[in-house]
């Protein structure tokens, strides 16, 4: 069910834009298996209607969770709600600078009050068991090379000449760039959400009308496509491929309607996987 579908029917451009920002903000929580609360949805609607500001949204969430008992194992709904509010706020702003500092600042704004390391480049190495890889992990950048790798990828993109490229080659290039900065995994957690928000803001500055519905409804596919773009297991005939990221961005930027099915990305021994997918 689309909690904000009414705004598509109303025909109010301002409210529609706000509702689309909220939809993608809430949808992106699914990359980590999180679901926003009904309380956030109702609060978001008040923001869309212009009854409350983003600061008031955040204050209401602070009070709501301050009074709410913490569930066993922590309260992931609180993370989903607060990060959604931060994403919607950032997407509503018309400011952006293409730089690693902006990327880091977006992470800081998204996760302040959630992670102690919000906006901090990790100083340790990581691996993450992936459902789409049958529990294996992408090889992420080493802690000692993160800053240099970020600087390199951003400098290459900043000087890249889009002039003369047809739309498909442009879409494929953007898929490659987004995949590259995601693979660095500059932060301990929250990399996919920060990368998605950065990508949306960047694409808007390039003049693209980004279809927010795609991020809202296919955020987990987006993450899995980035995983497959950066995973190799040559011994078993598995090679990094941008095929799936290209499908996502072709839908996003070219208006195509390619089916985006997570199970088609699955790398599994004997056709089976040992860990459950995110719901």
Image (cartoon, rainbow, N blue to C red):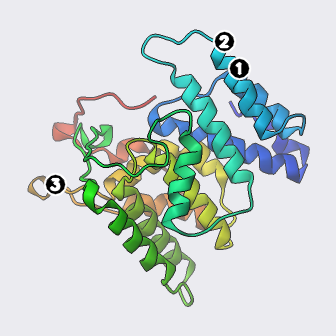
Q: Nearer the viewer, residue 261 or 160?
A: 160
Instruction: Tell whether label 1 touches label 2 (CB within 8 Å).
Output: yes
Residue drawn at 74 percent across, 52 percent down: 92
List x then y, in percent, for residue 156. 42, 79
Residue drawn at 82 percent across, 45 percent down: 8
Q: Quick check: can you spot residue 255?
A: no
Tag in front: 3 or 2:
2
Alpha carbon of mark 3 to alpha carbon of mark 1: how far? 48 Å
Alpha carbon of mark 2 to alpha carbon of mark 1: how far? 6 Å
User: Dot 2, how many residues are within 10 Å of its Cα: few (below 14), some (14-19), or many (20+)?
Assistant: few
User: Dot 3, how many residues are within 10 Å of its Cα: few (below 14), some (14-19), or many (20+)?
Assistant: few
Which sits earlier in the primary sequence, circle 3 or circle 2?
A: 2
Residue drawn at 24 percent across, 38 percent down: 134
Q: Which residue is mark 3?
A: 233
User: Dot 1, how many residues are within 10 Å of its Cα: few (below 14), some (14-19), or many (20+)?
Assistant: few
Q: Nearer the viewer, residue 81 or 116?
A: 116
**Label at residue 202:** none
Alpha carbon of mark 3 to alpha carbon of mark 2: how far? 48 Å
Q: Which residue is mark 2?
A: 67
Task: Specify the quadrant of the image occupied by residue 49.
Answer: top right
Q: Which residue is mark 1?
A: 63
Which sits earlier in the primary sequence, circle 3 or circle 1?
A: 1
């Amino acid at each position: 069910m689309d909690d904000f579908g009414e705004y598509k029917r109303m025909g109010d451009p301002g409210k529609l834009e706000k509702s689309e920002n909220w939809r993608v903000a809430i949808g992106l929580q699914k990359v980590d298996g999180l679901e926003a609360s009904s309380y956030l949805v109702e609060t978001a609607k008040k923001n869309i209607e212009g009854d409350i500001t983003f600061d008031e949204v955040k204050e209401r969430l602070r009070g709501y969770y301050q009074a709410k008992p913490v569930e066993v194992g922590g309260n992931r709904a609180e993370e989903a709600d607060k990060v959604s509010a931060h994403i919607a706020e950032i997407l509503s702003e018309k400011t952006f600078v293409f730089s690693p500092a902006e990327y880091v600042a977006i992470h800081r704004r998204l996760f302040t009050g959630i992670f102690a390391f919000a906006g901090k480049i990790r100083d340790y190495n990581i691996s993450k068991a992936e459902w789409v890889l049958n529990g294996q992990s992408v090889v992420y950048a080493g802690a000692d090379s993160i800053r240099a790798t970020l600087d390199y990828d951003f400098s290459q993109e900043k000087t890249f000449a889009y002039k003369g490229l047809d739309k498909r080659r442009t879409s494929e290039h953007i898929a490659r760039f987004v995949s590259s900065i995601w693979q660095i995994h500059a932060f301990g957690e929250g990399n996919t959400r920060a990368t998605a928000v950065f990508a949306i803001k960047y694409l808007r500055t390039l003049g693209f009308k980004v279809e927010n519905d795609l991020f809202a409804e296919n955020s987990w596919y987006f993450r899995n496509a980035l995983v497959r773009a950066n995973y190799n297991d040559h011994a078993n005939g598995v090679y990094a491929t941008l095929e799936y990221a290209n499908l996502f961005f072709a839908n996003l930027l070219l208006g195509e309607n390619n089916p985006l099915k997570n199970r088609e990305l699955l790398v599994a021994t004997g056709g089976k996987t040992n860990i459950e997918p995110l719901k």
